[in-house]
Image: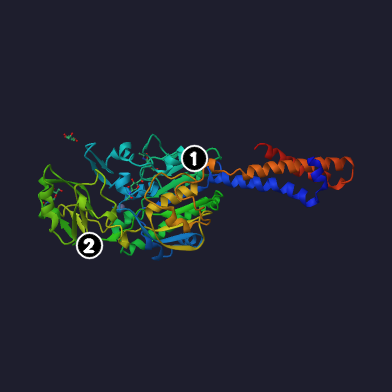
Amino acid sequence: MLGCFVRRGCPLVCLWALLLPLVSLHRLDQRGQRGHSVRDRPKLLLVSFDGFRWDYVDRVPTPNFHSIMDEGVTVERVENAYITKTFPNHYSLVTGLYAETHGIVANEMYDPIMNQSFSMETDSIYESRWWEEAVPLWVTIQKAGGKSGAAMWPGSDVKIHGMFPTQFLQYNASVSFETRVERIVDWFSAPKEKAVDFGVLYWEEPDESGHNLGPQSSLMDVVIAGIDEKLGFLINELKKAGLYEQVNLIVTSDHGMTQLFTDNIIELDEYVSRDLYTLVDKSPVVGILPKEGKVQEVYNKLLDANPNMVVYKKEEIPTHFHYQHNIRIMPIILEAKEGWTIMQNRTGHVMLGNHGYDNTLRSMQPVFVARGPAFRQNYVKTSMRSVDLYPLMCHILSVRPLPNNGSLLNVQDLLSSQPVPTMPSTPPRVTEYSYAPVIGSFISVVMVLCFLVFYVRQVTLKQLPSLKHRSREMSQPLLQEDLHL
Ligand SMILES: *[C@@H]1O[C@H](CO)[C@@H](O)[C@H](O)[C@H]1NC(C)=O
Ligand SMILES: *[C@@H]1O[C@H](CO)[C@@H](O)[C@H](O)[C@H]1NC(C)=O
Ligand SMILES: *[C@@H]1O[C@H](CO)[C@@H](O)[C@H](O)[C@H]1NC(C)=O
Ligand SMILES: *[C@@H]1O[C@H](CO)[C@@H](O)[C@H](O)[C@H]1NC(C)=O
Ligand SMILES: [Zn+2]
């Protein structure tokens, strides 16, 4: 019966029968990619140059940053997380959460429930529980069957919710940028079953020089040009490995840097006795833990003490900072005005540059450039929040984001192809597959079978000798593929 249909149809019908399965397979393939097919997951490398302020790219020639800007996207204004310090912001980038929610509220913390302190100067940073109020993206990807690699990103050598990154380097400031890059590129270019999907790469500069020299120093020009050369090294290594056109590369930072002036010092000892409190986190946003029953007394002594310092009781911290609802945020915080330093007294090392201030200050904001197959080309966006990066990365990596404070909607214009409207909160699932391609493929199989029946009959009759070999080769593999459905 089917044979009759084919026999009576014109050659176009046969051609259609041959092409339809191809189209159907192609559609299924695309859907597979947007679902959880690990093998075809797009690649993403997130790079942070600590303390790289947004305007450094226009200060000296930075050809490598500019090549990414020309071929990809730039965000002019990135509002990062309060407080604008290294640990809180690096964790916000990979969780999409404000510090009050991810729990790494400062570089130096005290947790009154744990009765323990967190400090970069001790091994406390390796204790999992500090980090486990959130789940970093590398853990989420691995739980979804993907792989990740980390070269010294803050927190990436800590076991969080039972997991390290698939590949990672133990933090060691002496390991060169070039070595970190080589390791990351190796992980990306490993055989398919082992290759990482998501990489994070961290470098300590230009933060360190920014603190020591002050961002206004002309010596910073050389430092910034040096960072651009490092970026050039990374680009070149990716090109050598044949990865540059595949990998989505995001280059950003945790915060900016502002100039300090040696006279702009606020000495707490002038206003309140050290016996009344413990100083938990350092300038420019100082965490004050008053001794038992002394909150009001300490607060009163500091409130109008110095016009260059704002004093907040925890419950008064402005809501736009999203910096209140965590036990690790101290009962009183002091925020220095830009360029000022809060100390107990003048003893000790005085820096010429610092960060940590109000995240709406332009000087505190980081660079943001990105390029790769997922991104638009030569596109400049006015503003985003750094927490928006997380849902963007999840979208690119086809991973379901955990609840977060960012919004894909805010940043989807950075993408080369816009997400389908249902995307923002829930990426497509396998169950959302339509039956259409399956039915289409089934019909196609039937059509191809019809065609074959027809064809074999014709060949037997030796009426189409010239088509013989080509048709066999084309139709048989298609049939096999389709029968797997
Ligand atoms: C907190 O820990 C310190 C030692 O680090 C100890 O002296 C103190 O008694 C502890 N406080 C409480 C409430 O357990
Ligand atoms: C840190 O890296 C340097 C340079 O590679 C190396 O010499 C040193 O042994 C490393 N330190 C640790 C503790 O691994
Ligand atoms: C300043 O503080 C340090 C401890 O932080 C102390 O050793 C020093 O005596 C203090 N200097 C003055 C002048 O109070
Ligand atoms: C941030 O996201 C977390 C997780 O969804 C949520 O609990 C928290 O309330 C959010 N914070 C803000 C300020 O919306
Ligand atoms: Zn710093």
Q: Which is closer to the viewer, label 2 or label 1?
A: 1
Q: Please give the label number shown on residue 261.
A: 2
Q: Position of residue 14 (x, y in %)?
A: 77, 48
Residue that mark 1 sits on? 146
Q: Image check: 95 left or right of 339? A: right
Q: Image check: 202 left or right of 307? A: right
- Amino acid at dot 2: Phe
Q: Residue furthest front?
A: 1
Quarter-of-image position of residue 80: bottom left
Q: Position of residue 425 (x, y in %)?
A: 44, 48
Q: Position of residue 112 (x, y in %)?
A: 21, 39
Quarter-of-image position of residue 123: top left
- Amino acid at dot 1: Gly
Q: Please give the label number shown on residue 264.
A: none
Viewer-proximal residue among 473 and 17: 17
Indicate the quadrant containing the N terminus: top left, top right, bottom left or bottom right: top right
Viewer-proximal residue among 379 and 241: 379
